[in-house]
Amino acid sequence: METTVKAPAKINLFLRMDGTREDGYHLLYSVFQTLSLCDEITVRTFPREKNSSSSPIVIRSSSAALPEDITKNTVYKAAKRFLDAISEDETEVMIDLIKRIPSQAGLGGGSSDAAAVLLAMDSLFPGKVSREDLQKIAVSIGADVPFFLTGGTALCEGIGEIVTPLADLSGLHVLLMKPSRGVSTPACYAAFDEMGAVPMTLEEKKVLKETLSGEGSSEERFRKAFRYWANDLEPAAVEAVPEIENGIELMKEHGASYAAMTGSGSCIFGFFDSEEKMDEVLNDEVFTILKGEGWWAEKVRTL
């Protein structure tokens, strides 16, 4: 059996910290938005030979970034935990992964890949796992994974596992830019903790949610909402990778309605009125210099 699934990238339209749990995990209040930039995953299943000593799960990737211990990879975890959930030990799984989403970017590539594998396995073994149990498997892999089971526009709370779908915000022009250096997520959160932040108020939460929940086109709701957005992790990430700020300023100089960092970085994004406006950024001599320093860029749309 075989199926191919796309694994979309995401941006955090805004990312606010809402305190911490007793175990030290940070609580989020963020809206995630999927994008047209996608990894592609093909999952094949075969009958497993009796008494085979080889791993039941094999991953082949277009990227060289797979960990030495493959059991720590989110794609492996997704396939293994699904097989465990259905008590299936007579099946081998071959996963081919075409990577387009850069790592250490805040674009959710690893989490999206894991969710795509869960969806692929669910289609290959229909009815074996309930939607509720699939959600539990997703949470066990990583806090962002549950969001990618549905994608779109959604408010994510807790450590990311509480997902509330919002009105569709698809079709908007977004330019992604990433410096050559990534940002370590643990280091970014540690730096954020040192800086400190004022806790969110209930009124702030209400405004952030309501501005995206109203009626109107994607463009109309975006225009109403973006003035309230911010990423609490951005100052900490900029301290580690100062060039993030240079990219944001370049986007704003060329008319980005809103530009910010996504997740814990180092990728930044900007909303533009047209593809031509995004081309202006990419054709600017400043970006030519940045590209020579290893910057990556991609024109995408919200999904």
Image (cartoon, helix red, strand yellow):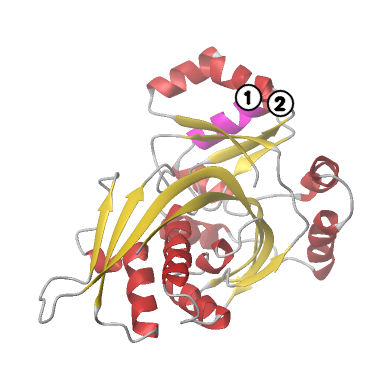
- Give the left or right position of residue 295, taking residue 54 as reference: right
- Give the left or right position of residue 200, taking residue 90 as reference: right
Amino acid type indicated by mark 1? Met
Q: Residues within 10 Å of mark 2 (few under 14, many from 20)?
A: few
Amino acid type indicated by mark 2? Ser
Magenta highlight range: 243-251
Residue 230: x and y, percent?
69, 49
Query: Is residue 236 covered in magenta?
Result: no
Taking the spot 47% from the left edge, 68% from the top edge, the residue there is: 123
Residue 149 visible at all: yes
Q: Main secondary structure of the magenta part?
A: helix
Taking the spot 42% from the left edge, 42% from the top edge, the residue there is: 100
Find numbered disc 2 in the image and state the secondary structure of the residue it sits on.
loop
Taking the spot 46% from the left edge, 60% from the top edge, the residue there is: 116
- Which residue has dot 1 on it? 278
Residue 174: x and y, percent?
64, 36
**Outermost residue toward the right?**
215
Residue 66 visible at all: no
**Outermost residue toward the top?**
285
Residue 280: x and y, percent?
62, 17
* Label of residue 274 in the image: 2
- Quadrant in which the N terminus is drawn: bottom left
* Label of residue 121 in the image: none
Between 287 and 55, the residue placed more toward the observer is 55
Find numbered disc 1 in the image and state the secondary structure of the residue it sits on.
helix
Residue 110: x and y, percent?
42, 57
Determine whether label 2 and label 1 are within 8 Å by CB: yes
CA separation in Å, label 2 and label 1? 7 Å
Q: Residues within 10 Å of mark 1 (few under 14, many from 20)?
A: many
Quadrant housing residue 232: bottom right
